[in-house]
Amino acid sequence: MTRRHLAIFSFLFSIFFAASSAPAFAQSQKPPAVPGSPTGDLREFVETAAVSGYEDELVAKIRTKLAAFHPAVDNLGDIIVTIGSGAPHRLIVTPIDEPGFFVSSISDDGYLRVQRLPQGGLPLIFNELYSAQPVKVRTTSGKWIDGVFAGLSVHLQPGRTNSPKSSDIENMYLDIGATSAADARKAGVDVLSPIVLSRRAMQLANRNLAGASIGDRFGADALIQLLRLVDPSKVSGTLTVAFVVQQRTGARGLQRILNTIQADEMIYVGRLLPGGPVAGTENIHRAPRREPGSGVLLAMEKTDGVPTGLGADLKQLADTSHIPFAADYSAGMIPPSYVSPPPMPTKSAHLGIANAWINTPAETIDRRDLWELENVLRLYIGERVEISPADDSQWGRPFDRFFPGPGKLEEVLRSAVEIYGVSNHEDLVRDQVKRFLPSWARTDTDDAGNLLLHIGTAPAGAKTPRIVVVAHMDEIGFEVKSISKDGRLEVEWRGNGDLSFYAGHPVLVHTPAGHHDAIMELPNQWDEPNFTWPKESERPIRVDVGARTPEEVEILGIKPGDTVTIPKAYRPLLGTRANGRSFDDRVGCTALISAVWALGGPLKDRDVTFVWSTREEIGLAGAAALAKRLAAEGRVPDYVFAVDTFVSSDSPLESKRFADARLGKGFVVRAVDNSNIVPRDAVEKLVKLARANQIPVQYGVTAGGNDGSAFVRYGTVDVALGWPLRYSHSPAEVIDTRDVDALGRIVAVIAKNW
């Protein structure tokens, strides 16, 4: 068997093994004392927020899992389980907290200002990776509500000087949909409310697991599994297992444990810690550098040294059982502080596993490393049973949600947002639009993929204007361009956006057979103090699905031409606000659907066509093809109403010099944008029509282009419509659903009365 065949076999084995049954134990092994699979525990821990000082929810979950051991919880929140008695007294400790933010003040207009925990010790890019991202905020009652950090709208930046830097905490504004401080407090949000990224545990190929703060949780999973398998009657001496809090903010939980428990030996289980330059090791600086898959790591301040003491004992145990075991650099587990730290046990060691993309939303570990770590800990306490790979099928995978029938407007919008459809891949969106249309609406699909609905029955020669109303189905994203030799996907934009909103975050790779979890890699040297984002033309954009050869990518069914997006969800905010990626232009699609239902059937003596177009984000391609065809057929529209985003400066990060349309104040006439100028009389006519029908309306100037401009060259008047959108082309897009309702209503009025 060649090396290539062996690699493919191993990869296939890992995929099929991931679907195997629960862990198999030796017949002499007693049943687990704690229910649940270890992978299920880790998934739950990753998806449970535990910002330093706010770990109570995770503490409660761990305590419940350990109920059979009657754990003690001290007044900091440390969880302590003690088994056996006498000497030696062995202590195994793991931290459970994570970095995050908390509310430090609330502005008069309802934005939350924040402070970070910890305040230092994280890469400079950490703050930036929260920009334009969905987050969760905990209320005073303990409920978590959705919000987003404000981000710069890409359409509004050209020509602007001195834009705010998203890495500066002074420019971090959290938007929960509140319009005043009173709104925010009424929802239960107040100063000291903790904030974390919305996250989902991901399973990549080759048993790689990823998720925000997974490096802060693998130790808890390992220790839960250790206690699940331990036989208390066989424990020699005393074994104390502690899950400690506030490690990120001064190792306060660890110091409490060391002050109260006089142990002979201690193993600290947790991520290896970055530090300053290390004398004599020019290639080791600021962070450990091992890649996932390196086995168990022993933390040492000099990685060229020889393990001694407890570290040497653990290495011998690992070597005897053929467990990969290596040294890597780590700073001390107790950082410098105002007071001297408590004394460490006579024998102590710090064990961990490698993390990729440390302290980012895409943090990744290798499940095999975690198994090996668990085995070393079992060997240490005298258990010589190796666990089989756990069932990874519990790790969440995305699925398409469908809400049957037209229902409420927000239900249609939710469904439209949660369908994936990168430019030139709009099939699922088109199918969804058709499902939501009434039975009388007979649609056609043209050669460009546009969905057309002609709802007028005007006779030939009628003087009624020929009208087209168009909204685009596609969304920005990426397309796989090629597969690298190391198994990474090289992708390119479809549409445009700010790469910093996507790199370092989870993504999905879409194939005809389904979705695959992946992460979009950050540029080289992302964790260096002098890092700056390179121009996109200077580097490929790379996506990691966990494969390490092109053959492994092929096994996953991923090919050039497949698309990549961020995972999406529709998230209600306070009041009538909502967050969701691809409101641009699923709001427009929804408005047209709403108008069709409002019309109730074909229109007599009118000539109106509704169009859901393709490939707008890559150059108005679908609309341009339709405009050209209609012109060739002698059916040039008199008017086109292009329904698309009004990119709004209704954000604390934007200049109010233009694009100042406010959320919740109605639809917007895009009187001027980069592709079109609406005639002044048409603006006035539309505003008058809206007010006559009691539909809230705004008008103004914004950036970006619209589908209607593709018709102008043939003699059509383009009257562009929109709705105010915050943080355009980012995961943090925010709308007010009242504006969506206004948009649908004005489209129906235009169809009947223009």
Image (cartoon, rainbow, N blue to C red):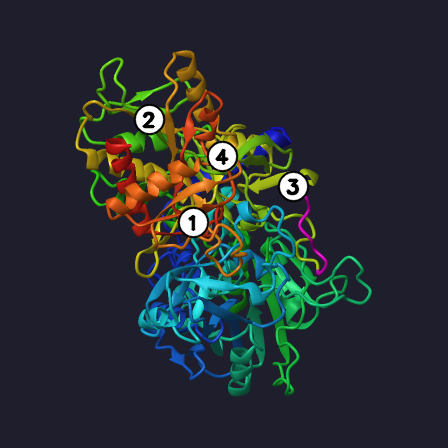
Question: Eyeballing the image, is 168 above or below 21?
Answer: below
Residue under pointer 2: 467
Q: Which image quarter: residue 25?
A: bottom left
Between the residue at mark 1 and the residue at mark 2, the CA separation in whole angstroms equals 26 Å
What is the crowding at mark 4: few (fewer than 14 residues within 10 Å), some, or many (at least 20)?
Answer: many
Residue under pointer 3: 536
Q: Which is closer to the viewer, label 1 or label 2?
A: 2
Residues at discs 4 and 3 in contact (Cβ within 8 Å): no
In the image, the segment drawn in magenta is 529-535
Viewer-side residue, 700 vs 667: 700
Q: Amino acid at mark 2?
A: Ile
Between the residue at mark 4 and the residue at mark 3, the CA separation in whole angstroms equals 28 Å
Figure quadrant of the N terminus:
top right
Figure quadrant of the C terminus:
top left
Residue under pointer 1: 725
Sequence order check, earlier mark of 1 and 2:
2
Q: Which is closer to the viewer, label 1 or label 4?
A: 4
Q: Amino acid at mark 3?
A: Glu
Q: Residue at x 52, y 73 (%)?
A: 93
Q: Is residue 465 left or right of residue 699?
A: left
Q: Is residue 691 left or right of residue 198?
A: left
Q: Is residue 532 magenta?
A: yes
Viewer-side residue, 664 vs 401: 664
Question: Eyeballing the image, is 283 above or below 598?
Answer: below
Does residue 373 show up? yes
Q: Amino acid at mark 1?
A: Leu
Sequence order check, earlier mark of 4 and 3:
3
Q: Is residue 569 magenta?
A: no
Q: Which mark is residue 432?
A: none
